[in-house]
Amino acid sequence: MTKKINHIGIAVKSLEASIPFYRDTLGMAYEGSEEVAEQKVKVAFLAVGESRIELLEPTAEDSPVAKFIEKNGEGIHHIAYQVDDIETALAELQQQEVRLIDKVPRRGAHGTRIAFLHPRATGGVLTELCQAADH
């Protein structure tokens, strides 16, 4: 089902304050930023090997990322796995009675299609499936 780790999402209070550490201190390649209005976040991607770090800054106090930071502080928010066919992956998980947050994919950054699995079904780790925009 999964091909590789697509990215690790890290909740931050400020992209502007956080990007220099990953880009300048750790030497990751900055790939750009964008706002994902549906998710109420601004995101920045930095490449590390075949995967990426996705920094997530909330754009509203009621966003899931803002609530995460309020409860847990800044830090790892989720792990995203790349899949070829997100509908098939979700159907297989539903057949296995895995608890899903998203039964239908939604739009993510860079035109990807994403869906989240509930942390109670994944050992406490918020897990994202993502399908590249070119599929």
Image (cartoon, rainbow, N blue to C red):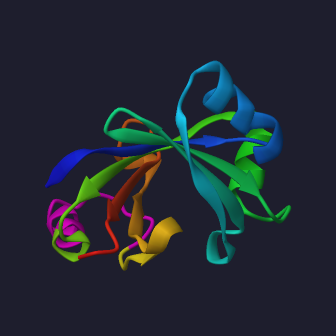
Q: Residue furthest top?
A: 25
Q: Nearer the viewer, residue 91 or 130?
A: 130
The number of numbered discs placed on residues in the rendered structure image is 0
Q: Which residues are magenta?
A: 89-102
Q: Would you say residue 97 sits in the magenta stretch? A: yes
Q: Position of residue 59 (x, y in %)?
A: 80, 63
- Locate the C terminus by quadrant: bottom left
| Residue 50 x, y percent position in the rendering | 31, 39
- Judged left or right of residue 74, residue 86 is left
90 to 50, vertically: above or below: below
Q: Is residue 10 magenta?
A: no
The residue located at (37%, 40%) in the rendering is 51
Tell me the residue at 70%/62% (across/down): 41
Residue 47 in percent (x, y) is at 46, 40
Q: Quadrant where the N terminus lies?
A: bottom left
Q: Is residue 14 visible?
A: no
Quadrant housing residue 94? bottom left
Q: Position of residue 100 (x, y in %)?
A: 37, 63
For residue 10, side relative to residue 47 (left or right): right
Residue at 14% of width from left, 66% of height from top? Answer: 92
* Residue 40 shows in this picture: yes
In the foreground, 50 or 121: 50
From the viewer's perspective, is residue 8 above or below residue 33? above
| Looking at the image, residue 73 lies above or below residue 36 | above
Is 69 situated left or right of 53 in this image?
right
> In the picture shown, does residue 127 fall above or below 25?
below
